[in-house]
Amino acid sequence: MTTMSSTIVDSSNASERKFLLVVDNNKASSTGLKALLKQFRYKVWIVATAAEALELMDIVTPALVVVGQLEDMTQVELTKEIRQSAPAAAASILVITPGTDAAYDRACLAAGAVTCLKFPLHVETLYRTIQVAIETVPRMNMRIKTKFPVIIEDKTLQCQEAKFATALSESGLYMLTPEPCPLGTKIPLKFKVAGKILSALAVVIYAHEFGNAADFEPGMGLQFIRISDQDREEIRLFIRGEVRKAISSVRRV
């Protein structure tokens, strides 16, 4: 790729810089939640008890606390404890309840939870709930961590060799490259998803050069500005399939 001067901006959703805390004594559901949340490109910690969660939050504050099944405290009690403790009070709290008692859900909300979800979890609802709770500019389309080759088809960029994307949504992707293009550059792409070759015209909306941001691999965020409905649907189905693999291991509490 031809070296070009880039204007470096941060992505609107720097999820890799945020960590989420899952508090759940059900190992199967906590492991599944961790896998699912990591697909959403968040760092995830797991603890089994409310006491461990409060101890951890004395040291560092997660962006979001996902409260599942507990034995040493009720979900309402833990929510109240977090809300009354500094600096933990800054964290958003999402409670996953059995969903059979509306009064209990209201008690969790009154204690300070941003919302209550129930099993079986709806993937899009979970994703958008998290986005609204902790992101400055919430994404409405699910964005997952993945890796696949991308070919830039533009001789002016002198780049026919395959690069790699590490994140994908219906609206765009993040492509690894040590020499990101300037903001606004339009780039025709081909990439393979689930064995199918897809095409799109994309525009650079943010970039990270080597050493510019320690939490990011050098590359650029590309937004699709022209893509067929069929190819967009292939992306949507691929993302849902990848997320479904993770969420299938999240059991009812």
Image: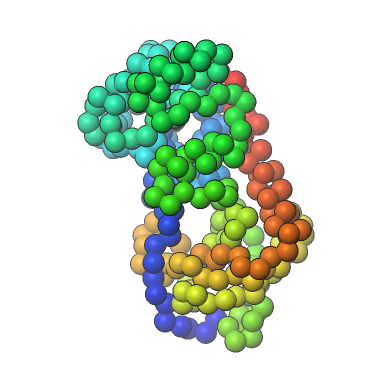
Tell me how the rendering is colored.
rainbow
| Percent coordinates x, y for residue 89 in the rendering | 28, 31
**Image point 40% across, 23% down: which residue?**
109
| Quarter of the image that includes the C terminus | top right
- In the image, 20: left or right of 201? left
Count of numbered circles in the view: 0
| Percent coordinates x, y for residue 200 in the rendering | 67, 68
Foreground residue, 111 or 153? Answer: 111
**Image point 44% across, 18% down: which residue?**
106
Q: Residue furthest bottom?
A: 156
Foreground residue, 203 or 46? Answer: 203
| Percent coordinates x, y for residue 172 in the rendering | 58, 61
**Image point 49% across, 38% down: which residue?**
129
Q: Residue furthest left?
A: 86
- In the image, 155: left or right of 61? right
Q: Is residue 40 above or below residue 151?
A: above
Q: Is residue 210 visible?
A: no
Q: Quadrant of residue 249?
A: top right
**Image point 35% across, 38% down: which residue?**
62
Q: Quadrant of residue 83?
A: top left
- In the image, 223: left or right of 209? right
| Percent coordinates x, y for residue 43 in the rendering | 44, 43
Foreground residue, 97 or 159? Answer: 97
Q: Is residue 159 visible?
A: yes
Q: Is residue 150 above or below residue 47?
A: below
| Quarter of the image that includes the N terminus | bottom right
Q: Quadrant of residue 22?
A: top left
